Image: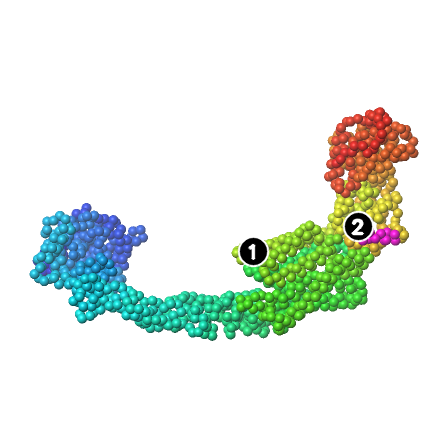
Amino acid sequence: MSPPSVASQAATGLPLTYFSHFNASWFRPQRFAMIVGEVNMSRLSRCSESVNSAYPLLGQEYYDATGDKDGVELQDGRNILKCWEEKWWVAPSCRGNISDCLAVVTGGSGWGMYELPQQAFFHNMPLAFATAAAKQYVPLNRDLQSLLYWWTPDASFIDFDPERVLFPTHDAQEFRRGIYRSMPSDVVLTNWAAGGLDSEMAQDAEGPLALASNMQLFNSDMVGLLKENQKLDIADGEMRAWETACNWLKTNRNRNFWHQWVPRETDCARGQGLVDALGAFVTNVSQALKCATCPSGYAALQHNGQRICSPCPAGFFQNFPGESSCLPCEPGSIAMEEGSRECQPCRLGEFANGSAMTSCYRCGQGDHRDRWTTSQLVVSQGDLEKWIQVQGATSQDFCACEAGSFLFQSSCMTCMEGSSCPGSNSLELLPGYFSTAEEPGEVFQCFGNSKRCPGGLPGTCAFQRDPTSVTCSKCIDGTHAEANGTCVSCSGRHVAIFLTVTSMAMLSLLGLYLILLKMKLRHPTSLLIVSISLSQMIFIAQKLTVLFRFKIEWEEPFLNVLRVLELLAFDLKIISIDCISPLNSTIEFSARVMVVPMFCIVVFLVHILHACLHRTHFFSKIQLAQLTSTVGTVFSICFIPVFSSLLAPFQCQEHPNRKFTLQDYHGVFCNFTEEHLQMCIIGAVACLLPIGFLALCTWVVLVEVPRRQSRSDLSFLRAWSFLFIRFRPGTQVFSVLFLVRNALVVLCQLLSNESAKVVLLNLMLYISLILTAYKKPWRFMVCNWLDILLLTGLMAIVDMGAVTMRDRPQTAMIICICFLSCMMAAILAAVVFGAWKYARQKYRKRFNFFITHQKSAAGCFARLLKMELVAAGKTVFIDSDDLVDVSCLCRYVSQDTQKLLILATPEIVKRRFCLAEMATAQLCEVPSIVLTWPKFQVPDENFIKNLSQEVEILNELAKFGIFRADIEGTLWWLQILESIKIPTELTREELGRIVGKLTNTVPKISGFASGETELPVLADPENLEAVSAALILLKCLQPQLSLDDVMPKLLCDDMKVTRARTAVLIITKGCFGSPRFAHWLLQVHSQQCSIVPVITEENHDSPSKEELHIAIAPLQIDAVLYLHVVQAVFRELSVRFVPASFSNSQQDLELHAKKVHSRLTFQGMNLAQLVSLEVKDDDDDYDASSVATEKT
């Protein structure tokens, strides 16, 4: 403030108004101003609450500017001002005696603290700075009357006449660097006003605004006003200010000081013009009453020393009110009328290339002028360009064809699909599309591998592609197409690929010929599973190649899989044939057509070579059959690809320019001229090949095979075995059905609608799936399941590609890959299973014995023999266990059996199943043993001749590949086989002999009685089947009766029934006429035993009374009593136990045995009681058909 400065000047002659007078090195200003020790610390604010809190970066900025590390301290990782007593920041020049520092008090949160500490440091000023507490800034400084931070004008300290301390002149450069050595720049306090607002309020305020603009009040006048304002004793500050201003105006009335501030009514300001009493603009001041702001579209122009509002001429504009001039329209805009408030930009397709124009020029000439626009490039990053349409074009350079059209021959042409016209006059092709530079608008879509057309400028192709070919379809000579769309120079690698694939094809044909040569026509091994599985894999792959031709956007990597499979469709480019010899489309198509004929030629050469090596005639029946079989197999495998390739000239694809090219030959137009016409003729003629093959196969299967089977034409059947060897006997027609299906799969490509293609393909697959699941045509069940799984997977892939690929391509691709992987895994599993089964059948047979027998004559004995052999540790199969499929039985014999047991009953050679099994064993050289029945006669020449004339049997067996010659050879073969005679009566010793001879062991035979028994089993000892059934029943009862300590025994020889309580009667045809059976039955009656009748024959009929009389007549017994006993037997409820039935398994027999056991434990009427009842009812008619029989 003024008092310290006055005191200093009075004492030293130096006022404290200059920074140099505070330099502690030569002057001590503390003598004249308040020091720190004289300030009440309670009236100060703490640094942490003021300056360090409000300005957290102040300490760091001070340190960076001064390097004074003692003036700051580190807190929470940052520098802050270091305050003494948390109140004072002390300059370096007086830190030795802080209480003697000059006190400088600022206010707020530390006003001026950015500049004050640095000024004290740089100028060696002994100052200490503090911030006044709340509401203490003014009172404290008024009490101290010393140094303070303040501004002017302000009335707080005006009565002390404060003076400013002057520092070096403001250095803006240092201030920008954060160094505050010099004086801050002055801030001029003024009021700014905007005039000319087009509103009533603005018009009313024009006078005050002009007055404020003219008013000039100097600092001395302002200080005087503030002092006079303090002198007035008026409490209301606002009223005191008005009173002070009024007194000042009155005091200076005669000075003419402020009169010049007040404007005249007609002294128009800038942007105003003269108006009359009605507010209309006038040009003469004599007509004017006042001034008004010129509106938009007008300008205030000088006219005879006055301002008038004049409208802007055409080509000019003014969009603000209160302006003194009109602006010319810039290039790109026009003002067609005068008084325009704004210029109108030229419309799209127009431009203005000068200023102040009144009309725009039109782009383009002639027709299609409506397609012109004006555009500008806004983004250009490499190949990416972004154009936008702009209005207000400033030159003709902005003229361009509108987006969606391009400039060609001075006209704007419409862009086609596959091209992009961003509005730059040029046409850019999208990736996957092509057009020539000469006709850029004729856009072709690059079907197939679209990467060969990278897009961009017309005429652009992938690397080393021929741009003169349609859709970049050809590589330049000496190069080969790659998967990425480019062409690479031919090298040894490509030649090696061609030679490798060709060699593999030749070796495959040789292998196929040799495999078919070794394959057994009638009894194929399990290796056929491998063959069928691989063929199914090939057919599925071929169907996928057909699916690849559908317009479905497949995703990687599934797309690469489909491309690789194109090799199966005879796509010769995959094997780099163009590196061997450049081919045009016609020659390439002809080469694809000739692939299968070339295969046949190779097979023919292999056939001739084989015949020469084995010194056989080329065209003998056997050799011709082998040749026909191999060629037919090749045609069957190649049916889909050869048919599909032949249809190539008839499969066209439409391009955006409405032109058509072939789907497989992208450089050939579908116009039935030149190359296309040649290919159509070749394809139409060559189509006779698969069609003729299909017709021939149909005729052979439906007509010739049945006839040749009846004639046992083995050579013919071997020749055409490729049609039916994979199928079960009786389902050979499926070979034709599958060929028809494959043909329809190929033909569905000719449909123009993609949805129709998918529907037809799905329909055929569904029908195939249903037929396969219902008929199970394949020879092996595993192949049926494999076919069902592959068809299901293929349908899933078709549906995913057609339905989901467009919406969720990545998900659909993953699902397709999963299904394809499952299909491949299933094929691999089937191949491994077939190989494993073949190895197991070759080195380890499934059955030790296979029993073939006549069920009606030896069914029970066969079952008994199986049980005894199983007890000896052998595996046995009886043909009656599976009489549904003869081919399955023959396969068991040929592949799964170590030794065939033939139960030679008299009629066995007349049973077709038995003949088939024996013939299979003879043809496959399976070791066999004949168990001859007493009445069996080895077939002689007459018998064989007569049997060979049984047409029905021969035709039935021919379906399974067994012909007349095979049957004759089998019947002669029976004469040289090892034989075991079966005795008339089966005893323990005989049964043990038979089993021991078969197993080379000493078997333990049970079931025969050797003494008295409490539970005898009665069976006709002269009936081998009855004895066998009884022994089977005993074996089934043994586990249950062993708990009762009662073991049933079969009566044999001349044994008698004594001490018996219950007897089991085996009821068979003619048993009541057996003498021993009759004596045993009478003994059961005399012993008053209970009985359990057991019927062991399937179609057993109870004998009539007359039949009983005839049977009893020869017997030397009491006929009347015996008749009553027999009749009483049929009064008892019987149990059915039929071991010979093929429907009764071991479990079924054990179940029936449990019923017998339950009857044994139930004590009913004994036989004597039953006879008594029979005698009482002797007068009644006897009806054997009324006998109750338990149904099971």
Residue shown at 10%/51% (left/top)? 232
Rounded to the nearest angstrom, the CA distance separating label 2 from label 1 is: 53 Å
The x and y percentages for residue 239 are 14, 51
The x and y percentages for residue 394 are 36, 71
- Quadrant of the snapshot with the N terminus: bottom left
Residue shown at 88%/49% (left/top)? 938
Instruction: Look at label 1 and name its amino acid.
Output: Val
515 versus 886 height, above or below: below
Identify the secondary structure beneath mark 1: helix
Label 2 Cα neighbours within 10 Å, binned few <14 / some 14-19 / many ≥20: many
Q: Which stretch is magenta?
A: 945-957
Q: In this view, does 301 lie to the left or right of 1147?
A: left
Residue shown at 76%/51% (left/top)? 887
Label 1 Cα neighbours within 10 Å, binned few <14 / some 14-19 / many ≥20: some
- Quadrant of the snapshot with the C terminus: top right
969 or 326, nearer to the observer = 326
Q: Name the residue under label 1.
A: 803
Labelled disc at residue 917 = 2
Total tally of numbered discs in the picture: 2
Instruction: Look at label 2 and name its amino acid.
Output: Glu
1138 versus 510 height, above or below: above
Tell me, yes or no, if residue 192 can be seen here. Answer: no
Residue shown at 44%/66% (left/top)? 403
The x and y percentages for residue 4 are 12, 55
Give yes or no for residue 950 being in the magenta stretch.
yes
Q: Is residue 895 left or right of residue 18?
A: right
Residue 1057 found in image quarter = top right
Q: Is the magenta region chiefly helix, strand or loop? A: helix
